[in-house]
Amino acid sequence: MNTPISWIKAYVPDLDVDINEFVDAMTLSGSHVEGYEKKDKNLEKIVVGRIEKIEKHPDADKLIVCQVNVGSETLQIVTGAPNLKEGDITPVVLDGGKVAGGHDGSPLPEDGIKIKKGKLRGVESCGMMCSIEELGSSRDLYPEAPENGVYVFPEDADVKPGDDAVAALGLNDAVVEYEITSNRVDCFSMIGMAREVAATFDKKFIPPVVTVKGSGGDVNDYVSVEVQDTDLCTRYTARVVTDIKIGPSPKWMRERLAAQGIRSINNLVDITNYVMEEYGQPMHAYDLDTIAGNKIIVRRAKDGDKFTTLDGQERTMDHDVLMICDGDKEIGIAGIMGGENSMVTDSINTLLFEAACFDGTNIRLSTKRIGLTTDAAAKFVKGLDPNLAILAMNRACQLIEELGCGKVVDGVVDVYPNPVSEVKLPFEPEKMNRLLGTEVSSAQMLGYFEKLGLSYDEKTNMLTIPTFRQDLKCMADLAEEVGRFYGYDNIPTTLPKGEATAGKKPYSERIADKVRNICESNGFSGAMCYSFESAKVFDKLLLPADAKERSAIEIMNPLGEDFKIMRTLPLNGILTSIATNYNRRNKEARLYELANVYIPKALPLTELPDEKMKLAMAMYGAGDFFDLKGVIEEMFDKLGFGKEVTFEPVSSHTFLHPGRQADIRKGNIDIGYMGQLHPEAADNYNIKTEVYVAVLNMDIVTMLSTFDRKYEGIAKFPGMTRDLSLVVDKAIFVGQIEAVIKKCGGKLLESVKLFDVYEGEQVAEGKKSVAYSMTFRAKDRTLEDAEVSKLIDKILNELGKLGIEIRA
Amino acid sequence: MKEKLQGIKDKALASIEQAKDASMINDIKVAILGKKGELTQVLKGMKDVAPEDRPKVGQLVNEARQSIEEKLEAKLKSINNAMRAEKMKRETIDVTLPGVKKIQGHRHPNQIAIEDLERVFIGMGYEVVEGPEIEYDKYNFELLNIPANHPAKDEQDTFYITKDILLRTQTSPVQARIMEQGKLPIRIISPGRVFRSDEVDATHSPSFHQMEGLVIDKNITMSDLKGTLDQFAKEFFGENTKTKFRPHHFPFTEPSAEVDITCFKCGGKGCRVCKGSGWIEILGCGMVHPHVLEMCGIDPEIYSGFAFGIGLERVTLLKYEIDDMRLLYENDVRFLNQF
């Protein structure tokens, strides 16, 4: 919502504040100012001057030399303007002053144009006489200005040399832009904003006194109105104007409309636009001679109805679009746009004015379905006060009379079956103070309410809420009014009292924090990816057609195919990020993300899906499978469940290298999986290097994690270390060997470390050599050599069953 | 005898003084104090001394022995010191060479913001709770005073899954869920992902994060809301931060406010970050609407409360002067490494 200060002053004449003070105070009273534009920001040192004498330029045919009286002195000014004569009064910018733009009306430069004394073809010129374009305006607003040349004040203008020319032309205005919240429908109008301004600065609010003289006759002889769908049209008012005289509007009206970005068309159109800006009520004008049967019917359209709006477009209606019809046809889409068939033209003689109240929600939905929105619709969408309709109607007729635009027929057709009545609310100062934490007196509160147009009846202790304030429905709403005029600034700052509460995080978040720390201490940085992605990711990740991950939740109205499904796998986001890094030639990258995947219980959704937190890790560059595995092992150790976790060779993950993938388990609990990204999948992401990934189920990790630790005592007795070098079939995983060693070693086996794996010349074909270092220790005594040898024999015996022998 | 001892002592001290290294010291020690050493020999010759003179001679021998031992020790120490000094001189390194770092990962800046916010509010007695990202219309809109066809539904450009299930557009549904559980008083915050149908550009993302706060108790006032957020702003943005509460409108709070803080870059003088105004809009808040309390089963005549919502990306972008929101979702390590 924009308001020129000058227009506001029309209703708040005592307003006299600096623009900065104005915007600050308005923002703090609830009308958030987004910005303002001073029309004269680039107009400096511009005064009124009278041309005393004109001579030809000695060296240039197209230039003249003028002696201009600017009040304090007479200046010599050279100009090429063709429209000047001695005695003309013009705006003059003095040496060192500024104008807004060039004389050709091209877009205005940000900082204006500086004017300096200089010589034109050898003759000194001490300033410049200005065209209306140079002053930042146009002939639309100042039709008296010449098409080509300097602006000359009309003879009856009340100006004299030396006056401020900017003020004299009314160019010293500022337009303020507000962000109006959706509850304040009344503030989408000059009157509404002026009421707020008056209340904010505690000045008198003087709205127009609306009266229509009338020229006799009876409106009912001209038109009848029938509203069939009163659910969508709560009020319909109509008046008739005869003997229409189309012509230009007065300058004050053109200026105000221009400040709102509305071009002046003619007096009729301008009046409807003016009233829409002033009261926030859209009006519509029909040529009564085009209306069949002198009858207006308001009803829903039929599905598939075609209708041509006044912009010449044919549009298709449906049964939820409200139409304005005459005796035999549709003539307008209610509240959105009139029809070509009832359009007002310059030959109009009798006018039918419509000011109605249409259901905002229906207008909003209709504009979407039809694909057409207009300024009028934008007003209705907010949900207008039905009582505004009659006020706006009469205001428009008043302007018709004042502007000599036609004769207003007596009477109003007003179809208003269920009048909206004013709401009454109890005046509860204690409750309001208790909610706000303030001690505002009752008198002060009533003062604020009065300025806002609420009235108070002492006897019943009730406040009457005017219908234009449909947002005031309960004590809390009234408390906000008190708060904003008392000043949010003046509300004290306290802290909640009452029962103390313990600040804490969920246990799962404590685990997640640990996981983040461990990832980061191992070079993995936190990534953030989208929750929705393309359904193509399943193909990119080589998932079979029947993979359960393909059962993903779809968004009905996605931003596009690339954001259509809610992810069921956490890999695509992080792999896309890995690809970004790779393609930007970052030498290496390690990323992790902790985020949800969304697993539907059934499709289509009938209840909320399972949101499962996953840890996804991905890396390329330095490091391989075992570096990643090491990070995961360290993580599990730190989370207190590292000991019994196994990494089981599998080949079931289609998007991983079939020979380089493992399921991560504890017993039969599935913690996650890891491996090298399948080279084909890597290709699909345009990554030409080995990528290692891991996915962990955070719900399981959280369940297994424990912060319980028991001190076990530091070994007091010496341990005994034995090394074993074995020859093994290549196909046997070291995991199997370790399992045997651990089983046979029993309680006395403190640790087993793999320190060498070798394949090659010194080992037989199809075999590999693996070497372990084992430490045995008893807690309560020094171990005997024989005890350990017995265990080693047992281990070798078991390994023998797998065909494993000691290396010779 | 006395002279003999003095002679041994003088000779010993002189040769100790001459000694150049630890082995020479050792040789001297053996030659004088060893089993066959000169002084030991003197002691062995005690039997030839008259019995009445023996204590005196014994004392002299001990004195000589003690001063030789002291001298030996002192000399050895000085030789060792000199050697160590010499060794350390050789070991001198160029301390301006770069340190050896283990490659560390970095926390995502948005996560840092979440944790910083959580820390402040946990310290004030708030519990962190979570809510679903895919949510029922009922919690995201209806219970928050946003009925069917309310324009706010449009404004937020909701992603729908079905007619009744959607991607939450705000963290506020957590408010309704917690209130519905009916455990009072309530003092919670809830950070999380939210979604709105905005095209991706430098200042918009269809997926971003908010943090919701909710306090419900007896006698909670708007002044408590002001005090709480003022304290938060000081702890989060710095001791000198000031807050400005501007009236605003949210369907589920009344009265409502938007909160500006003095720009943390320029302190309120006006700069690029605050676009010259000296203030930065940081969050929306208000007193929980009595109708919302009622719908969630809380009696507004007894209880009142406040709620607030912070846009995390906004805080992150402002705090680190990140000029393009897309950087947060690209995960380029050259970006992440800076946090």
Image (cartoon, coloured by chain):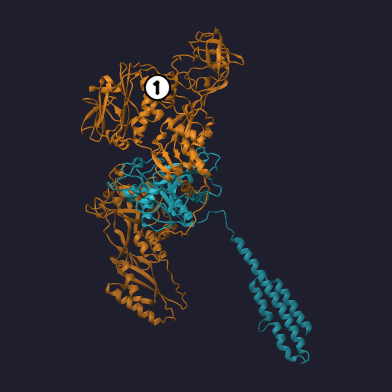
Rendered location of residue A172, percent (x, y): 51, 24
Task: Answer with left or right where residue A162 lies relative to residue A559.
Answer: right
Rendered location of residue B87, percent (x, y): 61, 64
Displayed quadrant of residue A193: top left
Quarter holding the N terminus of chain B is: bottom right
**Nearest the camera: B251 or A652?**
B251
Q: Residue at x 75, y 84 (%)?
A: B59
Q: Is residue A182 above or below residue A211?
A: below
Q: Residue at x 44, y 24 (%)?
A: A256
Residue A538 seen: yes
Q: Residue at x 64, y 69 (%)?
A: B80
Rendered location of residue A209, percent (x, y): 43, 26
Check the rendered structure and report the hue given to chain A. orange
Check the rendered structure and report the hue given to chain B. cyan
Q: Is residue B185 above or below residue A373?
A: below
**Nearest the camera: A626 or A518?**
A518
Tell me the element at label 1: helix
Numbered circles on residues, count: 1
